[in-house]
Amino acid sequence: MNLFNTSNNLLPYDGEVNYHGAVFPYDDSKRYFEKLQQEIEWEHDEAYMFGKHIITKRKVAWYANENFLYTYSNVTKTALAWTDSLLELKEKVEQLTMASYNSCLLNLYHDGSEGMAWHSDDEKALGTPTTIASLTFGATRKFAFKHKRTKETIFVVLESGSLLVMKGTTQNHWLHRLPPTKKVKHPRINLTFRQMRY
């Protein structure tokens, strides 16, 4: 099944973002959420901003085909070896998107108070154009895009088991974020499959 044949681009210009809704049924989504919560080697994320060392409540993990180094927010992470669950999910996402991925950055948000600020995944190691496939398990959360020049903002609601694909020049022209919210009391796990180029 090639989801790229659909024309549901959320962005009006300068990129392509396809939201495909739930590609995993409820029971599978719940099972994967529980396995990932238990099996992944989660650690608090770190960042160096304005000379300050920041440790987030949100937790992250970095997995890949090899021990790739990935640097963002002035912090470098070394990839861990795939777990069986991650390999299953990677294979499923590759089938759906007709693309290949050699790495995955995971985020664990414990509740709606934890989010992600505006940013682009435009590191040189990802190349241009780049495709990033994002899976959500757990709590439903709002996700936002903002054009770097025009400041136009687009929102999409990501449900458990859903797939969002960002491709083309999206990272060059658009920022994205996960806004915090007081309404969400449950955790969410997000997986972003990527193709690192060294």
Image (cartoon, rainbow, N blue to C red):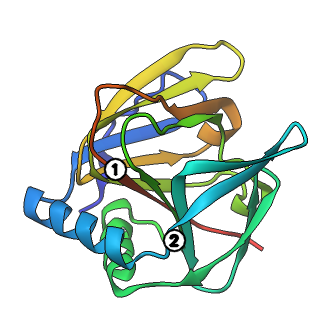
Q: For the C terminus, give its image quadrant.
A: bottom right
- Label 2 crowding class (10 Å Cα cut-off): few <14, some 14-19, many 20+? some
Residue hosting label 2: 101
Tell me the amino acid under the disc marked 1. Answer: Arg
Residue 33 percent location from the top left of the image? 26, 64
Vertically, is 5 above or below 185?
A: below
As drawn, the residue found furthest toward the right would be 51
Residue 195 percent location from the top left of the image? 60, 67
Rendering quarter of residue 137: bottom left
Residue shown at the point (79%, 57%) measured from the top left: 124
Vertically, is 134 above or below 100?
A: above
Vertically, is 169 above or below 14?
A: below
Q: Secondary structure at mark 2?
A: loop
Q: Is 37 left or right of 70, judged from the image as shown?
A: left
**How many numbered marks appear?**
2
Viewer-nearest residue: 79 or 2? 79
Residue shown at the point (27%, 44%) measured from the top left: 186
Residue shown at the point (63%, 14%) measured from the top left: 151
Comes first in the chain, label 1 or label 2: 2
Residue shown at the point (31%, 79%) measured from the top left: 88
Tell me the amino acid under the disc marked 2. Answer: Tyr
Residue hosting label 1: 188
